[in-house]
Image (cartoon, rainbow, N blue to C red):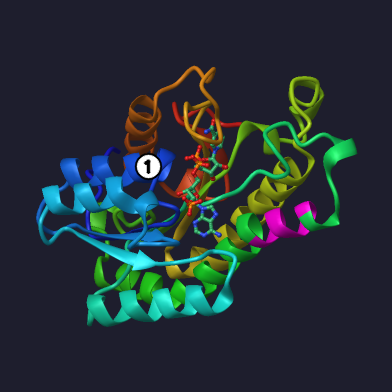
C-alpha cells in the first residue's frame, strides 16, 4: 500500500546530484510534519549553494548538517546534532545516498590501486554501516512511536514508520555481472556496492525485530557528475520513481535490492 512519506528524514550526500533532488522533492511533496536533515561535507562552501537555495525556499523544513561519510567523528557529530534537534522524536527514514567512484569514471583494473579500493569501501560501505549503527536508537524510537493499526499488524514495516534506504546500483549485482562488466569495470565501486547489498541484507534481518525496514534501491542510470551526461534519466525522474517506490515498500521488500521502478534485481 502506498503511503505518503513523512516524519524525520536524513539524506546523506545531499548537496548535488540525486541527493539534492531527493531533498527538493521531499521538501515539495511532504507536509508540515516532515523535517529533512540534509547531510553534506561542506555546508558553507560553494558546492552547497543549490542546497542552501532549497533550504531558503522551504523555511523551517530543512536543516543542513555537516557530514563526511568517510570520517567516523563527523558521522558521530552529525548523529548527535540530529538527536538534539529531534528531541523526543525518532528518525523515520535514513537515506544513505553519498558515494564515490574512483579512480575516474571507468576504474579499470590497470588504473586501480589499493588506495582507491580502500577509499571507496570507506565511504560507500563503512560510512553507511556506522551511520545506521549510530542512528539505531532514533530509528527504534520512531518505530515504537508509530504502531500500525490493528488490521495492519501483519504489514508493520514502512519508510513512513522507520527505515534505512541504501542507494545501490545494478552493477552491484553478482548475478548480472556477466552483462554489466562488459560495459564498465569500475572495480572499487561495484565491489563496494555488492558489500552495501550484504549490509542491507544483514541489517534487514538484524533490525526486523525492531520493525525497521532496510532496502537497497538502484536509481537507474542518471545524469549527474557520477552518471555522466550520456545517462538516460534525469535526477527528477529517477527521484520521483524512487520516492514512489519508497512510499510503497513493505515487509516483503526489506532485505531486497529493487530499482527505481520497483523491479527486484537479483543479488
Ligand atoms: N548517477 C548514476 O547513474 C547512479 C547509478 C547507480 C547508482 N548511483 C548511486 O546514487 C547515489 C548518488 O549518486 P550521484 O549520481 O548523485 O553522485 P554524485 O553526483 O557524484 O554525488 C555524490 C554525492 O555524494 C557526496 N559525497 C561523496 N563522498 C562523500 C562523503 N565522504 N561524505 C559525504 N558526502 C559525500 C558528494 O558530495 P561532495 O560534493 O562533497 O563531493 C555528492 O553530494 C550514489 O550512492 C551512487 O552510487 C548513481
Q: Residue 43, percent across and down? A: 35, 62
* Type of secondary structure dominating the magenta stretch: helix
Looking at the image, the residue that sits furthest to the front is 46
Tell me what residue is drawn at x 44 percent, y 26 percent: 261
The C terminus - image quarter:
top right
Q: Is residue 15 above or below residue 175?
A: below
Q: Is residue 15 above or below residue 43?
A: above
Can you see residue 240?
A: yes
The magenta stretch spans residue 46: no
Can you see residue 159?
A: no
Of the pair 266 and 51, the residue shown nearer to us: 51
Of the pair 112 and 135, the residue shown nearer to us: 112
Q: Which region is colored magenta?
A: 116-122
Tell me what residue is drawn at x 37 percent, y 58 percent: 45
In the rendered structure, the answer to whether residue 172 lies left or right of residue 205 reads right
| Within-10-Å neighbours for mark 1: few <14, some 14–19, many 20+ | many
Q: Is residue 262 above or below residue 111?
A: above
Q: Residue 88, percent across and down? A: 22, 81
In the rendered structure, the answer to whether residue 147 lies left or right of residue 178 reads left
Note whether ligand 1 is within 8 Å of mark 1: no
Looking at the image, the residue that sits furthest to the right is 110
Tell me what residue is drawn at x 43 percent, y 80 percent: 77
Of the pair 207 and 32, the residue shown nearer to us: 32
The N terminus - image quarter:
top left
Q: Residue 103, percent across and down? A: 73, 43
Query: What residue would you read off at disc 1?
Result: 246
In the rendered structure, the answer to whether residue 79 lies left or right of residue 23 reads right
Q: Residue 198, percent across and down? A: 68, 53
Q: Is residue 14 above or below residue 80?
A: above
Determine which quarter of the picture holds residue 9: bottom left
Of the pair 203 and 97, the residue shown nearer to us: 97
Amino acid at each position: 500500500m502506498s503511503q505518503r512519506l513523512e516524519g524525520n528524514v536524513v539524506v546523506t550526500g545531499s548537496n548535488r546530484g540525486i541527493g539534492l533532488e531527493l531533498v527538493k522533492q521531499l521538501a515539495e511533496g511532504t507536509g508540515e510534519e516532515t523535517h529533512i536533515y540534509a547531510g553534506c561535507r561542506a555546508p558553507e562552501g560553494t558546492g552547497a549553494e543549490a542546497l542552501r537555495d532549497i533550504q531558503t525556499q522551504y523555511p523551517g523544513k530543512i536543516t543542513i548538517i555537516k557530514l563526511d561519510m568517510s570520517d567516523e567523528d563527523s558521522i558521530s557529530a552529525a548523529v548527535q546534532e540530529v538527536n538534539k534537534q529531534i528531541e523526543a522524536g525518532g528518525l523515520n527514514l535514513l537515506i544513505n545516498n553519498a558515494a564515490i567512484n574512483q579512480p575516474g569514471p571507468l576504474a579499470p583494473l590497470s588504473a586501480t590501486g589499493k588506495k582507491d579500493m580502500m577509499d571507496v569501501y570507506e565511504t560507500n560501505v563503512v560510512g553507511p554501516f556506522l551511520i545506521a549503527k549510530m542512528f539505531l536508537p532514533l530509528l527504534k524510537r520512531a518505530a515504537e512511536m508509530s504502531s500500525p493499526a490493528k488490521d495492519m499488524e501483519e504489514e508493520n514495516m514502512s519508510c513512513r514508520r522507520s527505515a534505512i534506504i541504501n542507494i545501490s546500483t545494478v552493477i552491484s549485482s553478482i548475478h548480472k555481472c556477466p552483462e554489466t562488466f562488459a560495459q564498465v569495470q569500475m572495480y572499487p565501486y561495484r565491489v563496494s556496492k555488492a558489500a552495501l547489498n550484504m549490509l542491507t541484507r544483514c541489517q534487514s534481518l538484524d533490525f526486523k525485530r525492531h520493525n525497521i525496514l532496510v532496502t537497497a534501491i538502484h536509481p537507474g542510470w542518471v545524469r549527474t557528475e557520477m552518471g555522466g551526461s550520456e545517462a538516460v534519466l534525469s535526477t527528477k525522474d529517477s527521484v520521483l520513481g524512487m520516492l514512489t517506490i519508497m512510499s510503497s515498500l513493505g515487509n516483503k521488500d526489506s532485505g531486497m535490492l529493487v530499482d527505481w521502478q520497483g523491479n527486484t534485481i537479483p543479488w
